[in-house]
Image (cartoon, rainbow, N blue to C red):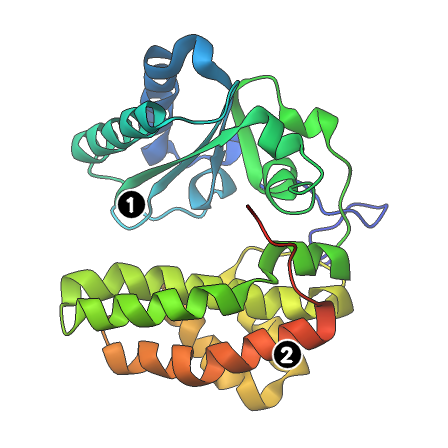
Amino acid sequence: MPNKGLDAGGYIEREGSPGLIPSAFRPVVATARDRVLDVFGARLHSAYLYGSIPRGTARVGRSDLDLLLALREEPTEADRTDARSLDEALDKEFPQIDGAGTLLVGREQVLSDLERHDLGWFVACLCTPLLGQDLAEYLPRYRPDSLLARETNGDLALFLPRWRERITEAGDSEQALRPLTRSMCRHLVRTGFTLVMPRWNGWTSDLTEMAEVFGTYYPERAAQLREAAVLGYEPRGEAAVLRSYVDDFGPWLAEEYARVHGIKKPRP
């Protein structure tokens, strides 16, 4: 990636496009687009794809379908119920996806000052427009700077207690540990990467590349993040590995992140 994900002006280029969607996933995306309109109708302001499918790196039977819906008003519990039903139906109908997940947000939340360098950046840089007016038109361009690092991942310390509880609750259940491993490891790799992102001066969503970039700045911790990158793609249900992340690597990373970039602004 010679340009490190940046345009000629040094701004993060938007990931993904409809043209990159692998052919096996196009029927899934087409059906999802129609269903979103059917289910949410006038409540919907805009809809987006994100993740491996619009980036063109999705694997049949292994990758999930990630949707973000920006509603005209703040999402209600009824909206969330509709989204869960939509996800379940898509997952059942299309074997080429390993689950579907729909993130609901309100239009005003995306455009708020508080979310400008977190959710706003996510929509503007990591989401591919699917339906409606693109909210990126109302958002700034983003550089891979310390402000972006702080506001995207400067809250790792808040996740560690929750992860410890979930590890305990999962026990030795492979079924419970695998999705937890995937989500935890991806979060840790992305946080490790954004810790060094301003020094590297670029952006990538590839977990393996993220871990390698991190390792050039923190070689003593490189092996741990490389292992997390592998588990982010191919999760195994090993509670001992997860405990090492919440008891050793995670606390170190949260402390180092706060030292380098500061703490993310608290959310209500």
Circle number at residue 124: none
Residue 10 is left or right of residue 117, and the answer is right
> Quick check: 177 above or below 15?
below
Q: Is residue 149 above or below residue 47?
A: below
Q: Residue at x 60, y 78 (%)?
A: 255
Which amino acid lies under the numbered mark 1 shown in the image of this protein? Val
- On the question of residue 145 being in view, the answer is no
**Element on which disc 1 rests:** loop
Inspect this view and state whether residue 74 appears.
yes
Find the residue positioned furthest to the top.
42
Q: Which comes before the other along the chain, label 1 or label 2?
A: 1
Q: Nearer the viewer, mark 1 or mark 2?
A: 2
Residue assigned mark 2: 256
Q: CA distance from mark 1 to mark 2?
A: 37 Å
Mark 1 in CB contact with mark 2 (< 8 angstroms): no
Residue 42 in the image, given as x and y percentages of width and height: 45, 8
Task: Examine the image and state in which quarter residue 91 appears.
Answer: top left
Please report the residue visible at 23 percent of the width from the left and 66 percent of the height from the top: 177
In the image: residue 134, left or right of residue 160? right
Please tell me the numbered disc located at residue 60.
1
Q: How many marks?
A: 2
